[in-house]
Amino acid sequence: MADSLKALREYLTRHHGGDGHQAAQRTLEGHARNHDERFRTFWQKHAEPAIRPGGQVVDLGCGPGLFLRDLAEARSDLTLTGIEAAPYMLEHACDDEYDFSIRVADLNDPPADLFAAGSIDVALANRLFHELHQPLLLLQKLHVWLKPGGVLILIDMVRQPLGSFLTHKFGRDRLDEPLDARAIAALFEDYFEHNRYHDSDLLALLAMTGYEILADQEIRSGRAVQIAARKPA
Ligand SMILES: C[S@@+](CC[C@H](N)C(=O)[O-])C[C@H]1O[C@@H](n2cnc3c(N)ncnc32)[C@H](O)[C@@H]1O
């Protein structure tokens, strides 16, 4: 295995709390919540019109692939491809049972030939960007891979003030009792890892790499956003 993939996998295991299989389990259990009615409405409005019959949809950072499974059941005409790097996510994947495939690649610096130029109708990046060391190279390459008029649906956590993060985590706004040092250190690490970008940072990166914004919607009480961006036709 290349040293860079090994280093990425070590980073992801740390980011996912040190226990990959538990992280995969959480991703499986969170699937319905993370692809809920609000997601489906956004997808129907902004992604579906860009998917041509027989087209290609890609899930970047697809985890165990449940979104692709759902899409495979609904649209048998599409080529469905997931990209994933964490071995524990791949072990829980159901790509043998359904009509989609998962490729292993590092989306921090994906190979230019991961997809052919102009071959993707719609790409989804659902809670991937905060896990990347930087998303700029992916945005540049994706711009080449998308068809003209192709759409990126980008969903992620965004920056929030430390106070509202702590209030949300503890479920209260006073913290005057003794706290466990290790748990609090882990909580602050979690804060910094999930508070990478403002909504406006993501919009700036998209504009600088040639995308036009179709929609930008705050979700989860402002703790996350869903953005639809298009490669101009
Ligand atoms: C928070 S999970 C979300 C999974 C899935 N998109 C969902 O919504 O259920 C992010 C996924 O992106 C993958 N990932 C993170 N960084 C990656 C990278 N550099 N290359 C490939 N996959 C990556 C992780 O392993 C993880 O499965």
Image (spheres, helix red, strand yellow):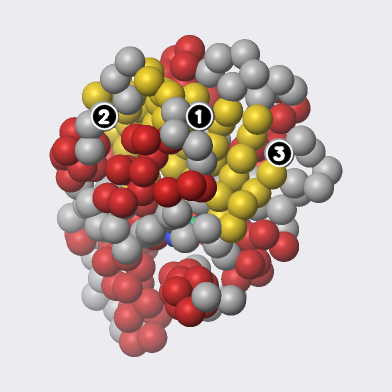
Would residue 201 be found to the left or right of residue 89 on screen?
left
Amino acid type, mark 2: Tyr
> What residue do we see at 35% from left, 56% from top?
130
Residue identifier under label 3: 100
* Front label number (1 vs 2): 1
**Which of the two labelled residues, at mark 3 and mark 2, occupies the earlier sequence position?**
3
Whole-angstrom CA distance, mark 1 to mark 3, is 16 Å
> What residue do we see at 34% from left, 87% from top?
181
User: Quick one: SS at disc 2?
Assistant: loop
Would residue 162 be found to the left or right of residue 98 on screen?
left
Residue identifier under label 2: 211
Residue 210, placed above or below residue 132: above
**Which of the two labelled residues, at mark 1 and mark 2, occupies the earlier sequence position?**
1
- Which corner quadrant of the image does residue 52 belong to? top right
Work out whether residue 104 can be spotted. yes
- Image position, residue 107 (x, y; %): 43, 55
Amino acid type, mark 3: Phe
- Image position, residue 16 (x, y; %): 49, 68
* Front label number (1 vs 3): 1
Quarter in which the N terminus is drawn: bottom right
How packed is label 1: few (under 14 Cα within 10 Å), some, or many (20 or more)?
A: some
User: Quick one: SS at disc 1?
Assistant: loop
**Which of the two labelled residues, at mark 1 and mark 3, occupies the earlier sequence position?**
3
How packed is label 3: few (under 14 Cα within 10 Å), some, or many (20 or more)?
A: many
Residue identifier under label 1: 119
* Residue labelled 1 has its Cβ within 8 Å of some atom of ligand 1: no
- Which corner quadrant of the image does residue 227 belong to? top left
